[in-house]
Structure formats: C-alpha cells, structure tokens
Image (tube, rainbow, N blue to C red):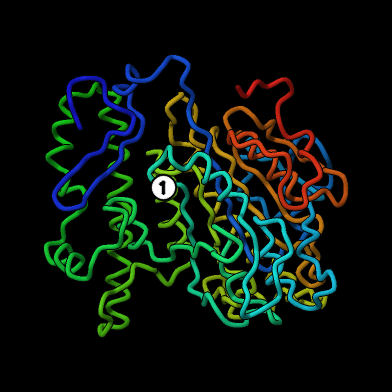
C-alpha cells in the first residue's frame, strides 16, 4: 500500500503474520485529500464510580473559569479547554418506585438515558448514545468504537440490590439486552489495535515472547520503504508515533514480567499492572494512538466499575472506595474520598496533556478536535443523588464548544440534552434521546455552521 504517489489516508504499515499499524495523518497524504477536508471530531467518556464530593468539584461562580476547585486542580493548566457543566440530571437513575439500587441504576442509565429493569434474569437497558453514533459513522474507521475498563468484574449475578452486574460493569450497550464489555487487559487491547483485530492465540503469543520481538520489527521493511519517501516533518511525526507504540509495548512487557514473578504458574502473564496509575497510562496511551491514527472516533472508558470497593494503598488509603463514600458526614472519611477523586483526575490530566501535545491533520491539537466527557453517575454519594451530576467536557469538538467556562444549566436539565447536542456535532442529529427535552443551550459557539 506504500507507493511514491500520494499516500491514502488509510495507509498501513504491514508485516509478517497479522501485524498492521495504521498511520497518523502525514503531509504526504494531503494531495489525496480535498481542500475542504476537515479533521474528524472524536468523543470519549471517562466514567468514575461512586459519585463525587461536590464541595471540591463545583466552582462557586459562573462564567470564565478562574481558579479550579480542589478536585480539578490537576487540570489547572488546561482550564481554557474545559467546559464545566452544572445541574445535569439523570432522573432515570432515581428509584422511581423500584427501591434500593442506585449504583446499578446510575451506571445502567448513564449513556442509555432510560430506567433499567431491576432483574437478575431479564436484562433490559437500551442502545447507548455512543452506539447510536457508532452505528452511523463507525464504518469510516477500523473500529466503530472501543470499550475500555480497568477493573475485572462479573457480567452476571447481583451487584446492587437486585440489579444485574451487567449494569454496574458496562457503559456501552449495543441493544437493550447486549452490553459491550470493556477490554481490561492492555495486552489484549494492543493485539486488537495492531493485529488482525482478534486476540493472538496462545501459540502466537508464546512465539512472539520467545523471540522478544516488537510489533515494529514485523513491519520494519514497510517502515523503511515509507521513510525513504517522506519529508523531514513527516519523518519526525512518524518517528514520534512509532516511539509511542514502542513505549506502550515496553509498559506491557514490564507489567507481564512483574506479574509472572508474582505468580510464575500463570499460563500466560497478563499485562494488567497492579498499580492504578500505570494501568491508566497504558490504556490511555493506546486511546491517544487510536484517535491519532483514526482507528476509531468513539471510546468509552469505565475507569473502575460502579460500586467499586477498590482500595488505594498507593495513597495510604486501605479502605474500599465505595464504603468510604457512605461517609455519614465524618470529616476523616470525606477527606479520603476527596483524595481519591483528585487522584482520578490527576491520571486523566496526563491523558489530556498528551492529547494537547499531539498535532492533528488540520494543524490543531487532537484535544481541539475532541469532546472528552469526564464524570460520574452520582453527585453526592452519601445521599445517592442523581442531580447536578459532576460533568466536564475537555476539548472544543472541532471549534464547536466555547470552552474555558462554567456553564449552569437549569436545574433538573436531563443529561440526555447534552448527548443530543453532542450527536449534532458528531454528524448524527436526532430529535430526542432517552429522556431529553431539547438541546443543551449555551454549549456551542454562536452562528457556527456545521455543514
């Protein structure tokens, strides 16, 4: 596929076996593109569990973002890229005569906007908003969407007061009864992105491990041919891109080596590191690569499952996250929750920085052409509140969002109004979704022509 003619936008570096590396945008591709071509808009959702201590999340003002509140402090350098939205509500997360089970409902309704069925046998949610978009534009990329996560969890059984674990452990839903389980293992994600799209067989994995060969070794011939045809700027961009891929490989190899030492009897060491920050960095680095190479434009990331009782010993917090959020207004427990909330944002800030420093095909940053939604399905976790949900959007969505602001919607504004507005920007307009009652006013730039 590599010739001295203008490179096609979907060019790959191909090698032996199933190895295939899609390329980022290069100047050598420009002649093959129409002058009016625009960089694609991407969206991603970062979901954190168990709500948020809102006193450390919400600014005390509207309008231009000034000093960020405590939880968001790690994003201070990027506040001009942030839209902080208040008063969004998921009414379908409330009991509505179904009794206990706020964690199951809040995650099950987060991207579907409907009240999920309280049952362990008959799962019923709805097609999630990300999948509606993927069904329309997913054919333009290698993967219609990617679903990622960081905490191994069951897909069946009772995870919250009679609600199936399918609700707490998934964000994306292909149909009302078919969730899309997130990929948790960085090695599995890497193989999907840079192979045939399917996980390697045990034999293939052993063979690659035996010879300690990088995916870049398998495509080295095609790489050298391409480099000989590129100008200095494209060669530098290609080198940086391939270096990012190699760094992810090294991270996975280190994690697998560490895990093998912990349990040498494992049939195949997994690439999941024990350290939360390292795991997040590996997964988010691959997210950046997927966006840069236009492998997908839609990603959901369940940072940990809803109701998670994960301890954070790296923060000197051995207590489970979920029990801590039922703090009963005890200052010591509330402080631990604030520390965990900020720790999550700290990891996210590293990804934002990477996106900010990566150039897109139109000369803007990847971040400029993204809508990265970060938030939770509960606000105050102690009271299990479903209004004023913690929500920020980072990025401008291709010069669509007027960022750097704190925007207060009317109280009880459906979260689905935000989704409908985002669907407009993704080129998938709909009249309504979930319990929406309109579009989110004040998000877009006035007079912007999306045609």
Query: Which residue lies under the disc numbered 1?
Result: 143
Q: Residue at x 32, y 39 (%)?
A: 241
Q: In which quarter of the image is residue 333?
A: bottom right
Q: In the picture shown, does residue 59 fall above or below 152?
A: above
Pick the front one: 392 or 104: 104
Is residue 392 visible to the viewer in this orientation of the structure? Answer: yes
Query: x%, y% of residue 262?
Result: 32, 81
Q: Residue at x 49, y 32 (%)?
A: 40
Please tell me whether mark 1 sits on a helix, a strand or a loop. Answer: loop
Q: Residue at x 61, y 27 (%)?
A: 399
> What is the residue that sits farthest to the top in this orientation?
35
223 relative to 142 in the view: left or right: left
Query: x%, y% of residue 354?
Result: 46, 43
Is residue 52 visible to the viewer in this orientation of the structure? Answer: no
Query: x%, y% of residue 165?
Result: 59, 75
Q: Quadrant of residue 168?
A: bottom right
300 relative to 221 in the view: left or right: right
Query: x%, y% of residue 15?
Result: 16, 45
> What is the residue that sits farthest to the bottom in this orientation?
265
């Amino acid at each position: 596929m590599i010739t001295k003619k203008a490179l096609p936008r979907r060019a790959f570096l191909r090698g032996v076996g199933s190895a295939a590396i899609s390329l980022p945008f290069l100047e050598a591709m420009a002649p093959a593109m129409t002058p009016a071509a625009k960089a694609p808009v991407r969206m991603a959702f970062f979901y954190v569990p168990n709500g948020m201590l809102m006193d450390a999340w919400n600014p005390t003002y509207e309008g231009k973002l000034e000093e960020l509140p405590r939880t968001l402090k790690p994003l201070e350098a990027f506040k001009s890229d942030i839209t902080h939205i208040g008063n969004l509500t998921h009414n379908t997360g409330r009991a509505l005569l179904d009794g206990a089970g706020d964690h199951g409902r809040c995650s099950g309704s987060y991207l579907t906007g409907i009240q999920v069925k309280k049952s362990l046998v008959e799962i019923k949610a709805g097609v999630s908003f990300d999948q509606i978009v993927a069904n329309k534009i997913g054919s333009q990329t290698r993967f219609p969407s990617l679903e990622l996560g960081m905490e191994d969890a069951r897909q069946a059984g009772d995870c919250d007061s009679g609600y199936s674990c399918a609700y707490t452990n998934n964000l994306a839903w292909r149909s009302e009864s078919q969730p899309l389980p997130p990929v948790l293992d960085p090695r599995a994600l890497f193989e999907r992105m840079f192979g045939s799209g399917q996980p390697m067989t045990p034999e293939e994995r052993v063979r690659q491990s035996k010879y300690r060969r990088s995916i870049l070794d398998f495509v080295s011939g095609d790489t050298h041919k391409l480099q000989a045809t590129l100008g200095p700027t494209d060669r530098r961009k290609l080198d940086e891109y391939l270096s990012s891929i190699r760094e992810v490989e090294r991270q996975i190899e280190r994690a697998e080596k560490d895990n093998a030492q912990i349990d040498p009897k494992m049939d195949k060491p997994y690439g999941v590191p024990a350290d939360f920050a390292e795991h997040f960095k590996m997964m988010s680095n691959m997210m950046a690569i997927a966006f840069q190479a236009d492998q997908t434009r839609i990603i959901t990331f369940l940072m940990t499952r809803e109701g998670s009782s994960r301890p954070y010993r790296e923060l000197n917090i051995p207590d489970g996250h979920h029990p801590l959020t039922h703090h009963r207004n005890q200052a010591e427990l509330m402080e631990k929750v604030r520390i965990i909330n900020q720790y999550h944002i700290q990891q996210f800030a590293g990804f934002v920085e990477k996106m900010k420093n990566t150039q897109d095909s139109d000369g803007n940053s990847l971040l400029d052409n993204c809508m990265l939604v970060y938030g939770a399905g509960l606000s105050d976790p102690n009271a299990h509140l479903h209004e004023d949900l913690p929500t920020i959007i980072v990025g401008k969505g291709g010069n669509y969002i007027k960022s750097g602001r704190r925007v207060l919607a009317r109280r009880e504004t459906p979260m689905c109004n935000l989704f409908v507005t985002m669907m407009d920007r993704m080129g998938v307009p709909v009249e309504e979704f979930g319990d929406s009652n309109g579009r989110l006013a004040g998000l877009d730039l006035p007079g912007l022509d999306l045609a």
